[in-house]
Amino acid sequence: MASLVRSTLMKNRGLWLPGFNAVRAMSAQAGPTPPFSTLSVSHPANAITHVELHRPEKRNAMNRAFWSEMVECFSQIAVDAECRVVVVSGAGKIFTAGIDLMDMASDVLQPGGDDTARTSWNLRRIVTKYQETFSVIEKCPKPVVVAVHGACVGGGVDLITACDIRLCTQDAWFQVKEVDIGLAADVGTLQRLPKVIGSRSLVNELALTARKMYSDEAKSCGLVSRVFADKEAMMAGALELAGEIAARSPVAVQGTKINLIYSRDHSVAEGLDYMATWNMSMLQTQDVMKSAQAAMEKKSPKEVPFSKL
């Protein structure tokens, strides 16, 4: 009987905690996943989706295709009942070098228009379109874990601040680069970074000087929650963390993410009121009874067969 229990537990553990082979598979993607040209999408373990920035020859610079493909990708993930959590990483030597200036210059510098007013409206449309590239991550009800190695520059900071959990390697560094190229960051960093690290003075310093922040400082200020020795260890840690999240009730997990973001942007009283309205329906899920039963029987959440959401 004991051997049967051990066998069952190990089988169940494999569903949620990806092993070495899954990590190796994530690191050996052949290329972008059609129809995408800048992203590689895979499923390394049950209920986990891995989205990899995949322009390694260009240091994962964000070209015109990237900005629309991220929206398409995360819009699909948001309604994918098979997915409960997402891991985002970068292929190659670094996470991302930020915006691909050569590819994007015509959009930003030559927006078109018959006069100043029309040119301004066209430029505003372009900026709001690019903002959605990272807002779609925040709007996705599935928690997003981002794993950063090497450089995370400019648009990379916009991306990671829209994610829910941030991990990095010891050699990682972060840079709000926009002032060095003559503009104010306009797709999320200035809005989200102050709420991520909590120090207005530090945010101002980083945004106004474009200095690099290394992994030790990123950990101490709360930009990342864990630092790993290298990329392989980080990806293993990211997958283990994703597995822990995926094992929980998707009703509880997605409701938690949505309410955390709502409460961030509203008062305590407003957040409590929203939470009460949310749970007036969500508490009627079978997941509550399943979880309570598992706790009484001293079972792990990984042993509870929650329905898809």
Image (cartoon, rainbow, N blue to C red):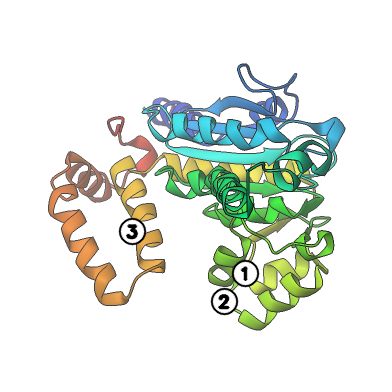
Q: Quadrant of the N terminus?
A: top left
In the image: residue 67, left or right of residue 245 = right
Inspect the image, locate mark 2, and give the three-letter code of the amino acid beneath it: Gly
Q: Which residue of the protein is positioned furthest toward the bottom in this rendering?
A: 201
Q: Which residue is mark 3?
A: 259
Q: CA distance from mark 1 to mark 3?
A: 20 Å
Instruction: Judge left or right: residue 21 versus residue 78.
Output: right
What type is the residue that disc 3 sits on?
Asn
Is residue 175 visible in the rendered image? The answer is no
Location of residue 189 by image quarter: bottom right
For disc 2, the marked residue is 198
Give the camera-side residue of 15 and 47. 47
Camera-nearest residue between 165 and 63: 63
Tag 2's secondary structure?
Answer: loop
Q: Is residue 217 above or below residue 105?
A: below
Q: Of the residues under marks 3 and 2, which one precedes in the sequence?
A: 2
Verify CB contact (< 8 Å) between mark 1 and mark 2.
Answer: yes
User: Label 1 crowding class (10 Å Cα cut-off): few <14, some 14-19, many 20+?
Assistant: some
Residue that numbered label 1 is attached to: 222
Badge 1 or badge 2: first in the primary sequence: 2
The image quarter containing residue 271 is bottom left
